[in-house]
Amino acid sequence: MAWKWCDGHSLPVLCVGAGADGLLASGAEGGELTVWSDEGTPIGQLKLEGGDDVTNATFSPSSPNKLYVSHGEAISILDARALKEPVDRFRVSEDEINCLSVNETDSLIAAADDSGSIKVLDLSSGKVVRSLRKHTNICSSVTFRPQRPQCLVSCGLDMQVMLWNLQKARPLWVLNLQELGEEEQQQCAGQLFNPPLAHAITLATCGNTFACGSEDGSIHMFKVAGTRFERQAGFKGHSQGVSQVHFVNFLSHPHWLVSGGNDGKVLLWDSSAGSATVSKGQAKGGHRRKAKSVKGQSASKEGADHNTVKAFSPKLSINHEEKVNWICPAQLKGEGWIIVADQSSTLSVYPITGL
């Protein structure tokens, strides 16, 4: 059963972010921004100038009251405890920003936008220091790698997943989810598949393991090995696109993963058990920059049996019933919760129980 957090918004909520000290922030259409207590009480509300949709809200890793939000083509920095006009505002993108990520040292923030670009802003100077352009469609998600403040992983509606180092203007490694999907379709002849447009990326605290949710309902698990990706596992629990994936950092181990989909389901997975279902012969698909990896293609072909999406069950299944805009795992007063934003103006809060 879900708790409902009300009175924070009048329009559909698009994003939720959790801070280290129990604060949460949610952004909605029309520039609405709300900060919540850990009891679900709105303690600050603001409508950002311009009225652009608030598409991402994330707290600083080093200053618990500092809040970064994206709205339109801009990033604003606010004081979550005194939610008034932004402390700083930077127009960084050419198109609407979809995702923000701050590195662990709180020195850089990356913004992925509808043009397919990733702009990296130096927070001390307020200047864009990198413009990463490789995605050929909307860049839907970007995240800095934990413990590696100069490294990023991104994905987009071009079905590409990319590994970046900010010392280079081009990706170190590019993987096409469609190539993985074609192998799976060959083994399931006669079935219809949605294209694996990549919607969301999340990295575990180790900085090496990451998950990607795609439009075909699959969750793909990868490991960063040097300058390449190795596929660890794939599993499917959603009947429609996976719009959200997040690792949960407060449960028994760091590889618990929560996903949300357009089918209205919210699922909690033990991805460490899922990875164990794939043998050591997993495919190493993808390519470095533009050149295809011949070794990777060979491994992919030989390891096709190990590269399919496995039948693997979630440990917790929530039928939220409404299309999921955002999910946010959070520890509130010592208990684990999943906060869900959908097409409504309220937040639904589910307990993590029975594990």
Image (cartoon, rainbow, N blue to C red):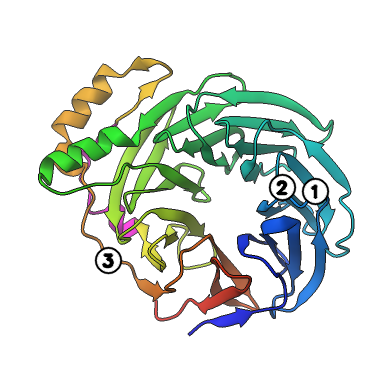
2 vs 67: above or below: below
Counting residues from the start of the chain, the first of labels 1 and 3 encountered is: 1
Query: Mark 3 highlights which residue?
Result: 313
Counting residues from the start of the chain, the first of labels 2 and 3 encountered is: 2
Query: Mark 2 highlights which residue?
Result: 71
Cα separation between marks 1 and 3: 44 Å
Element marked by disc 1? loop
Amino acid type indicated by mark 3: Ser
Query: Mark 1 highlights which residue?
Result: 50
Most extreme residue toward the top, as rendered? Answer: 291
Counting residues from the start of the chain, the first of labels 2 and 1 encountered is: 1
- Does the rendering let one see residue 282? no
Residue 110 in magenta? Answer: no
Amino acid type indicated by mark 2: His
Of discs 2 and 1, which sits in the foreground?
1
In this picture, residue 205 sits left or right of residue 83 = left
Contact, mark 2 vs mark 1 (Cβ under 8 Å): yes
**Magenta segment:** 272-284
Element marked by disc 2? strand
Main SS of the magenta part reads loop
Image location of residue 352, percent across then percent down: 48, 76
In this picture, residue 207 sits left or right of residue 286 = right
Which residue is at 81% across, 59% downward?
Answer: 47
Image location of residue 79, percent across then percent down: 85, 57
Cα separation between marks 2 and 3: 37 Å
- The quarter holding residue 83 reads bottom right
